[in-house]
């Protein structure tokens, strides 16, 4: 389970180090998310859990007259985001927890690429976000569907930890699959001050490695990011070597014309402030 506090420590550090590869893994989803956001009007835009800033930068470029704020719990990720921002005058990054933050200006568009599944209490967090959002503000975010629908997660986890459960989670637990349960997510948002909730499935390719050394590229990535990373660090020596060998075999099976990719399954969730 990944929690808010993890993002301020080891998880945030790993993602700050690996932002090039994580942006690559989300590329197909990012295009889908931005296409849905592009049809909305935003003057004060908030990117929740902005990470290293890819979506924030795209939003700032999409609407030069809008003001975009990227919000994240990790100082290290925000340092990377600020370094990428260049001279964009309409973009700022803030270190804060969206479940407790109070903005100076009420956002009328709130966006997140996989940044909202880590709240300890999602009901309270989304109720607070609704309180500070502008009247009739739009909310659009992405999140994973179940591990069983995400071969990148299930195959990697099973290689490292054979027999890992792959079912559809019920309810909520903070982490990458926290909002996999569509019914829970819809009911939670409706009870937290949001209306017109729409939850749309999106499939895309999760690219973990590419190039002449695609397997080594993917191994370096998956040892730091994703369901296998912590287990690979914590396994004792011989068990870690065996898990690494099984993972390498899975990657070799997935290698196709210099690319290692898996099917990935997400929701794109949209709503308006009630």
Image: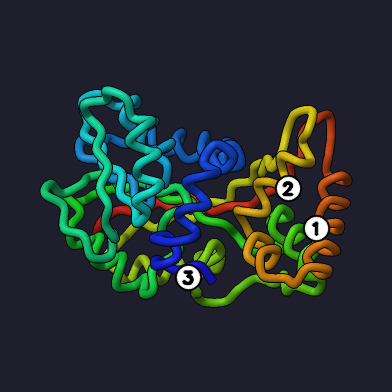
Instruction: Tell me whether the residue at label 1 lies in contact with that at label 2, contact meaning CB atoms closer than 8 angstroms.
Output: yes
Please indicate whether residue 68 sits to the left or right of residue 244 in the image.
left
| For residue 123, above or below residue 157 | below
Which image quadrant: the N terminus?
bottom right
Measured Cα–Cα span from mark 3 to mark 2: 26 Å
Query: Residue 252: horizontal and vertical position, in percent?
Result: 87, 44
Of mark 1 and mark 2, the one earlier in the sequence is 2
Q: Residues within 10 Å of mark 3 (few under 14, many from 20)?
A: some
Q: Which residue is mark 1?
A: 244
Query: Residue 229: horizontal and vertical position, in percent?
Result: 65, 60
Measured Cα–Cα span from mark 1 to mark 2: 8 Å
Instruction: Tell me whether the residue at label 1 lies in contact with that at label 3, contact meaning CB atoms closer than 8 angstroms.
Output: no
User: Of 92 and 15, which appears nearest the observer?
Assistant: 15
Q: Which residue is mark 2?
A: 219
Please give the count of numbered marks on the rendered protein. 3
Q: Can residue 134 be spotted in the picture?
A: yes
User: Which residue is rendered at x = 74% and y = 41% of the image?
Assistant: 261
Q: Residues within 10 Å of mark 2 (few under 14, many from 20)?
A: some
Tag 2's secondary structure?
A: helix
Measured Cα–Cα span from mark 1 to mark 3: 27 Å
User: Which residue is rendered at x = 88% and y = 51% of the image?
Assistant: 249
Instruction: Tell me whether the residue at label 3 lies in contact with that at label 2, contact meaning CB atoms closer than 8 angstroms.
Output: no
Q: Residues within 10 Å of mark 1 (few under 14, many from 20)?
A: some
């Amino acid at each position: 389970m990944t929690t808010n506090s993890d993002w301020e420590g080891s998880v945030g550090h790993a993602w700050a180090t690996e932002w090039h590869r994580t942006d690559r893994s989300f590329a197909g989803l990012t295009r889908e998310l931005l296409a849905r956001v592009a049809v909305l009007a935003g003057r004060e835009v908030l990117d929740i859990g902005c990470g290293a800033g890819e979506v924030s930068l795209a939003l700032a470029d999409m609407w030069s007259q809008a003001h975009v704020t990227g919000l994240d719990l990790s100082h290290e990720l925000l340092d990377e985001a600020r370094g990428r921002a260049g001279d964009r005058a309409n973009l700022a990054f803030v270190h804060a927890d969206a479940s407790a933050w109070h903005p100076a200006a009420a956002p009328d568009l709130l966006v997140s690429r996989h940044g909202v599944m880590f709240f300890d209490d999602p009901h309270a967090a989304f109720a607070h976000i609704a309180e500070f959002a502008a009247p009739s503000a739009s909310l659009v975010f992405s999140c994973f569907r179940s591990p069983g629908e995400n071969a990148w997660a299930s195959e990697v986890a099973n290689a490292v930890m054979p027999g890992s459960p792959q079912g559809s989670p019920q309810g909520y637990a903070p982490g990458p699959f926290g909002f996999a349960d569509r019914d829970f997510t819809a009911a939670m948002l409706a009870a937290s001050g949001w209306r017109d909730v729409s939850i749309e499935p999106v499939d895309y390719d999760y690219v973990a490695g590419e190039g002449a050394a695609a397997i080594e590229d993917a191994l370096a990535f998956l040892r730091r990011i994703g369901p296998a990373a912590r287990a690979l660090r914590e396994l004792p020596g011989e068990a870690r070597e065996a898990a690494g060998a099984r993972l390498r075999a899975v990657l070799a099976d997935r290698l196709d014309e210099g690319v290692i990719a898996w099917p990935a399954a997400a929701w794109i969730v949209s709503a308006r402030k009630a």
